[in-house]
Every structure is written in structure tokens, then in C-alpha cells.
Image (tube, helix red, strand yellow):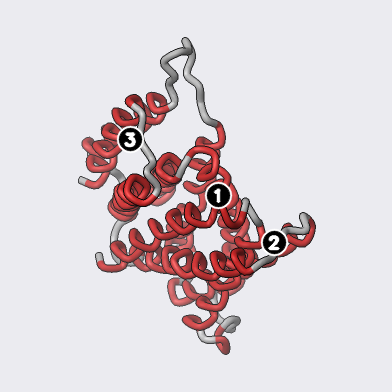
Amino acid sequence: MIYLLLAIISSALVSIIMRLSENSTKNNIAMLSINYLMCLILAGFYTGFSNLYVLSEGMNQSIMLGLLNGILYLSSFILLQRNINKNGVILSSLFMKLGILIPMLISIVFFHEFPSLIQSLGFLIALASIIFMNFQKDQTNINFKWGLILLLFVNGITDAMAKIFDEVGNSLLSEQFLFYTFLFAFVISMILAIKKKSDLNKNVLFYGLILGIPNYFSARFLLQSLQTVPAVIVYPTFSVGTIISVTIAGMILFQEKLFKYQKVAMIGILIALVLLNI
């Protein structure tokens, strides 16, 4: 469980650092490129630069899954960055972590890890809380913040890639899987940064480098957790721990506040995540 705790801490730091950087970087794609460069360096260090490509069964599979995961990682980060600027760190991190619904469904349907009746109840409460959180008092219809919904979906698929690799990949090549994930994310983000002529300055460089550290370890520790603990335990615990950490940080560090409907929905979501973890 130590890997799971470290994954929670790392994941919370990612959201907090992105919130701290928003006034200095202005959605700069170059910051994400520097972030992935740091992830790439760390992945190369832990993999061993002489072991980046080995003639072993499952190596090509690790590269292909890394390519897909890299695209998803970059998309998830761009969505998270934009949602933090528009909706704040608490709501953005909340919806990002509610993406656990997707990898848990994948674990049930494809890998036959079935939740208990109480965990199933948690699913329903979580979905109801998402709808309630988006309800506006002055409107007769439910007003969905589609940026948050898209963040939930993309991040859920991204998180599920760790479970997919754990099931169909070679566990001995997990470090290589992470290396190619960040390699492809770095290359694609660099292409976008050059195309958009994204500004590279000392703030972008600084925040990109420090962001890459918890970003890499969040992925690494989550993957290590899934190798020893069932996904139906890992994902809910990972989510509720991150949500609680980021919510406390958002209220203390950034004076963010939750409105009445959001407070009720937040309670519902926390209850749901606890039920999912039983």
C-alpha cells in the first residue's frame, strides 16, 4: 500500500503545481513539453539507458501501448490545465479523479474484477453527484460543464492504460512502457509548442521541470500499486485520497470555496468513493 500512498501524494502535487503556475505560464504548451522532458529523463534513469529497447517478448507491445498512453497523457494534461484556469483546482481535480469509473468498468467487463454490492452503490451515488454538481438553481435544465465531463472521460481512459498494460503487457517491461509513454508525449507536445510558437521563458522552464517530477512518480507508483493490489481497490483509494488532498490544498493555499450545491455533491462523491473502496 505504500506505493498507493505515494501515488496519491504525487497526483495531488501535480494539480497543485499546475494551479500555482497558471498566472506565470498562461496555458503554455511549452510547459507541458518541459514537464514531459523531465518525466523522460526520470524514466530513462529508472529504466537504465542501456535497457530502453531490449529483445524481449512484449517489447513492441510496450512501445505501442506507450504511444497510445502518451497521446492520452498529453490530452489529459491539456484538459486539466484549461479546466483549472476556468473552473478552479478543486472542481477540476474532482472530475479528473472521478474518471475512476472508466478503469473500474474496464476491470469489470474485460478483466472480471467484480465489485461488491456496496461498491456498485458507490457507482450510482458518484454519477448522481456529478449531475447534482452541475445543476444550476436559476435554470430548469441541468447545465453540464462539458470541459469537466471531457476531462473525466479522457483521464479515465488514461488511468485505465495502467491496468490494461498490467493485464496484457510484460510486467518486466513496465519501466520501458513508462519511458515510451513520456517519449511520445514529449515529441507530440514539442510539435504543438513549435507550431503554436509557444513562449519559452524561465517560468515555463521552472514549472515544467518541477511538474515533471510528481507527474512521473504518480504514473510509476500507480502502475506498481496495480501489480500487487486489485484495481477495484487501487482506483477508488487513489481518487478519494487525491480529491481530499487537493480540496484541502485548494481551500488553504488558494482560498477556493465550494458553493452550496457543490458542497452537497462533494459529500456525495466522498461517500461514493468510500463505498467504492469497501
Compared to residue 167, the image places residue 274 above or below, namely above
Q: Nearer the viewer, mark 1 or mark 3?
A: 1
Estimate the spatial distance between the alpha carbons at disc 2 and disc 3, rounded to whole Å: 35 Å
Disc 2 marks a residue whose amino acid type is Ile
Q: Residue placed at 55% from the left, 73% from the top?
A: 38
Estimate the spatial distance between the alpha carbons at disc 1 and disc 3, rounded to whole Å: 26 Å
Foreground of the two, 7 or 173? 7
Q: Tell me: 239 left or right of 157.
A: left
Q: Are marks 1 and 2 in contact (CB under 8 Å)?
A: no
Compared to residue 163, the image places residue 80 above or below, namely above
Helix, strand or loop at mark 3: helix
Query: Which residue is label 2 attached to?
Result: 188
- Mark 3, Cα crowd under 10 Å, few <14 / some 14-19 / many 20+, is many
Q: Which numbered tag is attached to residue 123? A: 3
Foreground of the two, 124 or 10? 10
Q: Which of marks 1 and 2 is in front?
A: 1
- Of callouts 1 and 3, the N-terminal one: 1
Estimate the spatial distance between the alpha carbons at disc 1 and disc 2, rounded to whole Å: 17 Å
User: Which quadrant: the C terminus?
Assistant: top left
Helix, strand or loop at mark 2: helix
Helix, strand or loop at mark 1: helix
Q: Do the residues labelled 2 and 3 touch (CB within 8 Å)?
A: no
Query: Which residue is label 1 attached to?
Result: 81
Foreground of the two, 224 or 56? 224
Residue 96: name its quadrant: top left
Residue 269: name its quadrant: top left
